[in-house]
Each structure stands twice: as C-alpha cells, then as structure tokens.
Amino acid sequence: MLKLFKIIADAGEATAKYPFAPFPVSPGFRGKPELNAAQCIACAACTTACPANALTMGNDTADGTRTWQLNLGRCIFCGRCEEVCPTHAIVLTPEFELAVANKADLLQKATFRLQQCEQCGQPFAPAKEIGYVMDLLRQSGVAVDEARRAEFASCPACKRKATVTRDAVSQHLSQEAEQ
Amino acid sequence: MNGPLPLSNPMAPRDERGMPVPLTESEHIAALKGKLLKDIQRSAYVYRVDCGGCNGCEIEIFAAITPVFDAERFGIKVVASPRHADILLFTGAVTRAMRMPALRAWQAAPDPKISVSYGACGCSGGIFHDLYCVWGGSDKIVPVDVYIPGCPPTPAATLYGFAMALGLLDQKLKGTHQIEGEADRAVVAHPAIALDVRVEIEREARRLAGYRAGRLIADEFLTLASETDLTLDECMKRRLSGEEDPRLAEILTRLWDIGAGVARG
C-alpha cells in the first residue's frame, strides 16, 4: 500500500491547474490575432490571404474611410495574416480565452482614412499607405521630401494624364531647341 | 412526416415568407435559466450535437475530459442522450441534413437548457460559411447562450467556455473599434538597412525556414546587425557560439554570408 502511494507521489499530478491558475501555452501557439492599428497601412493583404474570410475590408467612399474587420467567430487561427503583413501590424497573441455570450463582441474593427487624389478629388488609396511608400523609397536611397507628397497623392489615372502632358510639352520644347 | 410543414409547426418555425427562423425561448424559460445558473448546486451534463462538423471539435471536447484538463472535476460530464443534458454543445456548420436532427435534440433536452455554439463553424459557419448546403452557424437554428470560437477551440478554451456558460467566469473579450489618429504613421522596419538588402535577407530566411519562422529569424538577424557596435562577424560569432539548434545556426550562418557579401560590396 505504501509502495503504491510512493508511486503515485512520484508520478505527480498530470492535471493542469487551469482555470484556477493561468494556462501556459506552448511556444508558437496561435491565439487571437491582434491588430496594431497605428502600424497598419490598410493595404488589405491580410484580407486577401485569409482563407476563412474572417478578415474583411470595406470602403466607404462617401465618408473617405476604409474599415478593417476581424470576425473572431470565423477565424481559424492559421496565421496567414501575420505572415503576409508587410508592416508587422497584425500578430497572433497567446490569448485563447475568447468565449463570448454576445456575438457582437467577436467583431474587432479598425477604421482608416482614404487619400483623396490631389487632382480629381477621388479617394484611391489609404492615406497611410502613401506615407509608407515614401518612407520605403527613402529607405532604398531615393531622396523624397514632403514637398513631393502631392505627386504621390495622385490617383493612377491623373498621374498618367500628368505624364502625357509633361512629355508632350518637353517634346515640343526639344523640337524648338533643335530648330 | 408527409407533405409540406405547416407554418405553425413548432419543430420548424417560419417567417411570413416561409423561410425557417431560429427557435426561440419563452421569457419563462429564460427566467428559469437565470435561476438555474444562480443556484446551480450540482453537476452540469453536456450533450454533444454534431451538426456536420469535421470531428476536430469532437476530438478537442474529448481532450477536455481527459485527466490532463479533467472537466469532470467540475462535474461537467458528457452524456449520451439529450434527455439527460443541461448543456447542448453544437459543433459544425449545420448542414441541411443535420438541421432537423439538431432541432430534435434541442427539443428533447429538458428546460432550462444552455446551448453552446462550439468552434468556428458553430459560431458563424467558419470556412464553410458561404457553402450552399450549410446554414452557417448553430445560432441560425436555436437560441445560443455562449459562443466558443476556435478551429478547433483548445481544451483550455473549452473549459473557459463551459465556465462562462455556467456563469463562473466573466467574459474577457470585448468588441473593439480602433480609429486612425491624425498623427498615426506606419514605421518602416530596420530603417538603418537598405531596402533591397532587407528584402533579400527576409526572402532567404523564409525560403529556408518557412514563412512564419523565417520572418522571426530574419527579424532577429536584422536587429542584431543594426543595433550592435561590433562588426557583423564578431556579433554573429557571439550569437552562434551558444546556439544549440543546428537548423537555426545554419540559417543564421546563411544570412550572415549574405550580410557579409553586402558589406564587401
């Protein structure tokens, strides 16, 4: 009998203390995806990558905003969003206590401003994405100052038009110079 | 049952257009349920209703009643009949064929009962949400008290969900809505390192280690390289001296080669 108690004592207790003590998750555990909205550029890479369509984005052109939405009830915690995020804005945390009584609490949202085109006034890209592109150009050695922001804040159609006009003018000028 | 269902059939309530709507609870039952949760002095029996799931959720439910998580120490016991159940656990995205059996299980359970929506499919249809043959969540057919998301929920998350259903623990998750501030600006990672070098190192790390781990390793390498006062060679020698994982060591050595190549020009 004592021998049996000794064996039991040696084997220890297998049962986890949870929920009376915090549950230590294993390294690399994929829990609730957490968005750092300050770092997000609203590029929608995560919504394209999301296999379950838990991540969605919608534009409100009248308001000039783009809203990111994560439905945790649909999320399968695969981590694709974390993999594709270019700015490391979305990270899977070890948080697993996600049960809710009210379904609306499963929705996580974030709203971003859209950039209006400097020429035609139509919204065409998130404002933060433009700032990020300028920073990336600076990082790769192109001198871009804030004064050139208007150039970057033009929609592709207006940019094309401006290029055509500029080229036509310069061609005209070079012909004059030749004469 | 022969012929179309009568509109007043309590088994399958329908709206004015003839479309099925979720079953509802009467106020009396809801009050009884509140009383049950307040004064529950006995075990809670769980009946698991599979509404067309992949069995992943079932595996985790049974993991939750193994000795490691041991839901039975709280008196939570999985029973074989809905007639014994206090808690109904709906798993799966509710396929067309499993809707009526699920409704019958719900009606067979004695009142007051607690319905729990289990797993991503149960909460909102999960990856099957837009399939033609599913209802997309157990809340489309029965009144649900607690949603446990996850694909599948871990045993610990299952215990937490049960505790929430029994009113022992409080809900932690809240719906959030972040709004972009005026001064918000995305920070470029590792600004001290040229973009093409960073991209090359990230690509190589991801090629060798896989997408997620590769990014973590590339991040570590770039942080080491940009924040040290030592030369890259010294810094990497110091980093690799105590490294016990040969795979990580190999990948870091490969990144070191690329970094050294860039430094040489």
Image (cartoon, coloured by chain):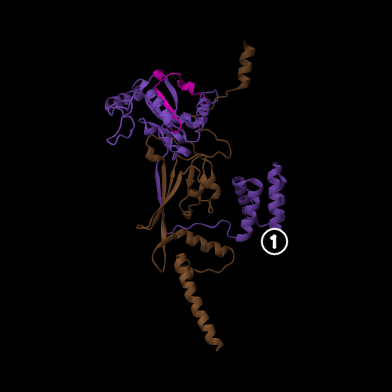
Chain colours: A brown, B purple
Q: Toward which corner of the image does residue B198 lie, by quadrant?
A: bottom right
In the picture of the structure, the residue carrying the numbered disc 1 is B263
Q: Quadrant of the N terminus of chain A?
A: top right
Tell whether position B87 is magenta: yes
Res B127 seen here = yes
Q: Is residue A136 left or right of residue B164?
A: right
Q: Toward which corner of the image does residue B247 lie, by quadrant?
A: top right
Q: Is residue B73 left or right of residue B250?
A: left
Classed neighbour count for the residue bearing mark 1: other residues with Cα under 10 Å, few (<14), some (14–19), many (≥20): few
- Tell me the residue at 69%/61% (across/down): B263
Q: Is residue B239 left or right of residue B55?
A: right
| x and y, in percent, of residue A86 in the image | 54, 53
Q: Residue furthest front?
A: B3
- Identify the subunit bearing mark 1: B
Residue B32 or residue B245, whichever sits in front: B32
| x and y, in percent, of residue A177 in the image | 54, 87
**Magenta extent:** B69-94
Q: Quadrant of the C terminus of chain A?
A: bottom right
Q: Is residue B12 left or right of residue B231?
A: left
Q: Residue furthest top?
A: A1
Callout 1: SS: helix
